[in-house]
Image (cartoon, rainbow, N blue to C red):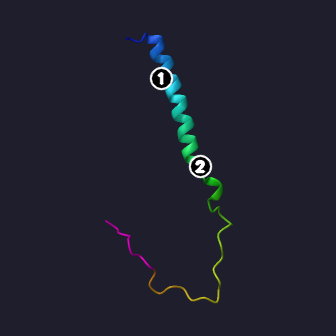
Amino acid sequence: MSLSPDEIVDLTEILVVLMGIGVTWAVYHGSDKAELPGEASVPDPHEVDDAMPDTSGRTLT
């Protein structure tokens, strides 16, 4: 089975639209749970900051 040039263009257009919908969904899925600027919790000013924060699992390399 061989596709004509018009069918290839139509198929490509459909796939590009579906990929755009997929990317849009992936970006916005769960974004309503994101912490927005101004909504972050303010730490208690009476608590002391960690002198040595937990950096296990982090690396610079």
Q: Nearer the viewer, residue 48 or 33?
A: 33
Q: Amino acid at mark 1?
A: Thr
- Residue at 44 percent across and 84 percent down: it is 52
Gap in angstroms between the C-alphas marked 1 and 2: 25 Å
Picture quarter with the C terminus: bottom left
Q: Mark 2, residues whose alpha carbon is within 10 Å: few (<14), some, or many (≥20)?
A: few
Q: Amino acid at mark 2?
A: His
In terms of image quadrants, where is residue 4? top left
Q: Nearer the viewer, residue 22 or 35?
A: 22
Picture quarter with the N terminus: top left
Q: Mark 1, residues whose alpha carbon is within 10 Å: few (<14), some, or many (≥20)?
A: few
Residue identified by numbered label 1: 12
- Looking at the picture, does residue 15 appear above or below residue 28? above
Point out residue 34 in the picture as x, y percentages from the top left corner: 62, 59
Find numbered disc 1 in the image and state the secondary structure of the residue it sits on: helix
- Is 45 colored magenta in this rendering? no
Q: Earlier in the sequence, mark 1 or mark 2?
A: 1
Find numbered disc 2 in the image and state the secondary structure of the residue it sits on: loop
Point out residue 13 in the picture as x, y percentages from the top left corner: 52, 23
Residue identified by numbered label 2: 29
Point out residue 21 in the picture as x, y percentages from the top left corner: 57, 36
Residue occupying the far front of the picture = 1
In terms of image quadrants, where is residue 22? top right
Point out residue 42 in the picture as x, y percentages from the top left corner: 66, 76
Q: Nearer the viewer, residue 8 or 47?
A: 8
Disc number for residue 53: none
Residue occupying the far left of the picture = 61
Q: Magenta residues, as a range? A: 54-61
